[in-house]
Image (tube, helix red, strand yellow):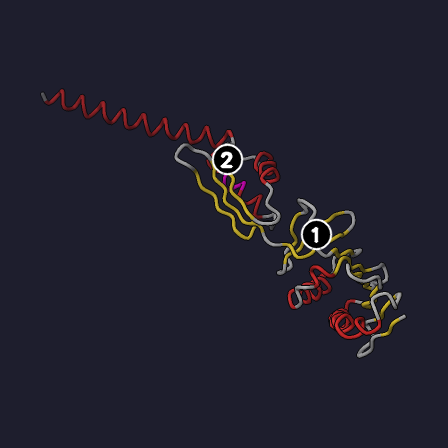
Amino acid sequence: MKWSIFKVVGSLCLAGGGWVVGDWYYMTLMRSQGVWILRGEGPLWDSAWVVRHIQDTKSTRPSQRIWTIAQTLQQQQLFAYLHFSYTGKGHGCLSARTRIPVARIVLPPRQSYVDAEGNRLPFIRPLDLPLIELPKWDSTAIRLILTFLEKKPLYKQLISYLSQDSDGIWQAHLEISSESFILGRTIHLKDALEQLDIYLRVIQPFIGGHSCRSVLLHIPNQIVCQ
């Protein structure tokens, strides 16, 4: 009788151990095969882009692959929220929300986006946002422009193009008028952008939107129409 009890207990232990080992093997197999359930939102969410990064990520141990994938995606600075988990069947789950871009950066030969906090985001798809082109990265100028857009969000729709030439001079072009707005150098940007707002609210309604070819906004306390 005692021997029968030991046999039953032993059989249950072996069965339980086999289930644990089998489940572990299945989980490892599914993880190594890269079966993923993706849930995302945000203007730059693209499941195909995420899948490519998952497929390109290698790890020596399948059980550590999820951490490697997490690090790879976090380095892109695309996501404001990123969460990983596994289902009971071993499928990888990714829930994400992208950051919100406020401007498109053209820094030859590459393009990217930037959010309100100044994070540079990958260029995944074209969006209708203000275009900022400059020969080299200018963190001070970008910060001044982003602060202006945050303070006056209407200009996210009004400004079509901001550019800095090789001499460091900034110009702006708008969707609603034909003038070229000369903003001066980076040190003039803050005041020049404020004077742009004054010109559009006070002067342009009086003289008309096609009266000037260019408008100088970088001269302190002056707006010069040419």
Write down the residue under mark 1.
128
Q: Residues within 10 Å of mark 1 (few under 14, many from 20)?
A: few
Report helix, strand or loop for mark 1: loop
- Compared across the picture, whether 160 is left or right of 37 comes to right
Residue 9, image quadrant: top left
Left or right of residue 172, residue 24 in this image: left
The tag on residue 152 is none
- Disc assigned to residue 36: 2
Which residues lie in the magenta part? Answer: 65-69
Q: Residue at x 50, y 32 (%)?
A: 35
Q: Considering the numbered disc 2 on the image, is that residue within a helix, a strand or a loop? A: strand
Determine whether 164 is above or below 70 in the image.
Answer: below
Q: Position of residue 25 (x, y in %)?
A: 41, 28
In the rendered structure, which amino acid carries the disc numbered 2? Trp
Image position, residue 177 (x, y; %)? 81, 62
Q: Are marks 2 and 1 in contact (CB under 8 Å)?
A: no
